[in-house]
Amino acid sequence: MPLKEPKYKFNQTILKVFGTGTDKKIKVITMNVLRTSGLVDDEKDKKFSERGTVNTEKLEENISRTKSKIFELSYCNPWDWFFTGTLDPAKYDRTDLNNYHKKLTQWIRDYNKKHGLKIKFLFIPELHSDGKSWHIHGFLYGLPVEHLKQFKIGDTMGKGLAYKVKKGDTVYNWPPYANKFGFCDLEPIRNHEAVSKYVTKYISKNLATSVKELNAHQYYASRGLNRAETIKKGTMLMDLIPTYANEYCRVTWLDYSDDLLAQLEDSII
């Protein structure tokens, strides 16, 4: 009779590759304690937890896990546009996040069918300063630039956007969205890693608490998006200087190369 696998393993490493094309990173996660069953390897959520964890700890762990997932989806997909969308209060209840999500995702599905496109998205909701109304930030790919209209000096726009246009930044309007929902703007993505880190700032305690009260989500994503590729799991023999470390894990980010990936893979037994 085979021996039962232990519930926990110690000093375990997970080797992953993030990104697409030539824009890739290697992530090495070494956990002090790792569950054998039901493995989830977002590093900050691997606490060797005790029963009766207080709500604040659970909230912080949930925020950390969500940030990790959003960074993964952001960095591992070939996004074209950073998107900000609002709701026109004359057309929609801006406090109804669930309805906004349902209407928007259905509209994108219909838009894809109408134009023969495959637009993919990753959206993160954010509260306006009134603490009640919602807008979204996030990413799009598969939306041709021909469907957009570049903002020019003299167009109706907010102060912040007007400043960008005045200094020469390229910013677009998506007129079909604007006609259906409200004001929006899109900027071409030039640095996937930087914008992936930037977008996680929208995930906060305020957002987590607000969406929980609404029984909503902290982010919305198309089906079939790319995820990080897990290359190997086991015990790593090579010593690495961590990029991040706490009492539960060590994380090292490395610039990608085929040779380095092969060396790291060979060092895990």
Image: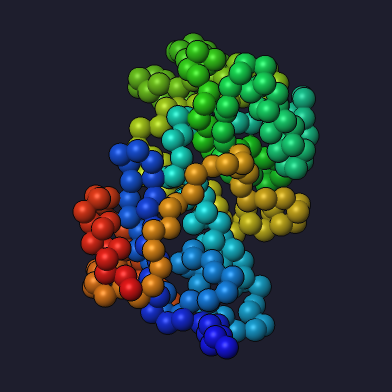
Residue at position x 62%, y 16% in the image: 115
Q: How many marks?
A: 0
Residue at position x 24%, y 72% in the image: 238
Indicate the quadrant where residue 59 lies.
Answer: bottom right
- Left or right, 163 with respect to 217, comes to left
Q: Position of residue 218 (x, y in %)?
A: 63, 51
Residue furthest to the front: 1
Q: Position of residue 223 (x, y in %)?
A: 61, 41
Using the image as rendered, state which of residue 147 and residue 118 is in the foreground.
Answer: 118
The quarter of the picture where the C terminus appears is bottom left
- Left or right, 25 with respect to 152, comes to left
- Left or right, 79 with respect to 130, comes to left
Using the image as rendered, state which of residue 4 and residue 264 is in the foreground.
Answer: 4
Using the image as rendered, state which of residue 74 and residue 118 is in the foreground.
Answer: 118
Residue furthest to the left: 259
Residue at position x 68%, y 28% in the image: 109
Kindly tell me whether residue 182 is visible in this rendering.
Answer: no
Residue at position x 53%, y 23% in the image: 143
Q: Position of residue 19 (x, y in %)?
A: 39, 45
Indicate the quadrant where residue 121 lies.
Answer: top right
- Residue 33 to residue 14: above or below: below
The quarter of the picture where the N terminus appears is bottom right
